[in-house]
Amino acid sequence: MRASTTTRTTRRPCALGAALGLALALAARPAGAHITLDAPPVRDPSMKTAPCGGLLPFSSSPMTFAPGAPVMVRWHETVPHPGYFRVALSMDGTTFPADPPDPPPAAVFPVLAIVPKVDGTTSYSAAVTLPTTPCARCTLQVIQYMQQHAPPPYYYQCADITIAAGGSDDAGSPPATGGSSGGCCAVAGAGGASEGALAAAALLAAALVRRRARTTLGRR
């Protein structure tokens, strides 16, 4: 009987450790995106690191546009925030205008457009005109500026392009429908799942601790 009690007592700390390990693993998963560039194709799906959201290098297959072409840049927002969007162009793929203030100044090249937020809208686009100067490593940048948000109030997405004769003037298919909605503290995608799983694991761990305490008192 004593050996059986020892086995049960040993399993409970193991279960507790497993629950806490699951909670930590799920909490470490990245939160869902707030903004997604739909067209032209995005360089990096990340969004928090300036100037292009993540650390991926210039695309190995950038889309080619004709000099002076009108291009429709399309993106959608998955977690709405009050604020605005800015579209800018880097002629070397690395040098971008400074992050904008609030309110933003008027769009002057290399800034191509300022797009205000509209309540209830998740899909956005900006018709921009590319310069007539050819370039082999240009990058279109979309910045989301978020009011009522802890600093830094920016998310970034980039699309690498080239400007050359014979290129296209169509950035791609229409954007996907926007995802989940919410305010500044809303969490979308994997982030929401992580928080829910963390809470569930914490409750499980607490229940195991209480059960172990009752078992210990019963043996006394």
Image (spheres, helix red, strand yellow):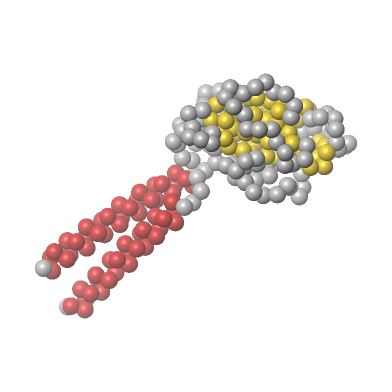
Residue 78 lies, in percent from the top left, at: 54, 36
Q: Is residue 127 visible?
A: no
- From the viewer's perspective, is 27 left or right of 111? left
Residue found at the very far left of the displayed protein: 220
- From the viewer's perspective, is 159 left or right of 36? right
Quadrant into which the C terminus falls: bottom left
Residue 50 lies, in percent from the top left, at: 62, 41
Q: Is residue 176 above or below residue 58?
A: above
Image quarter for residue 107? top right
Q: Work out whether residue 88 or residue 208 is closer to the camera in this orientation and state it.
A: 88
Residue 156 lies, in percent from the top left, at: 62, 38
Image quarter for residue 63? top right
Q: Is residue 37 above or below residue 196?
A: above
Q: Is residue 217 above or below residue 185?
A: below
Image quarter for residue 143? top right
Quadrant into which the N terminus falls: bottom left
Residue at the (52%, 43%) spot, across then down: 32
Q: Work out whether residue 143 or residue 2 is closer to the camera in this orientation and state it.
A: 143
Q: Is residue 93 visible?
A: yes
Residue at the (65%, 45%) spot, across then down: 44
Residue at the (27%, 55%) spot, across then down: 206
Residue at the (23%, 74%) spot, across then down: 6
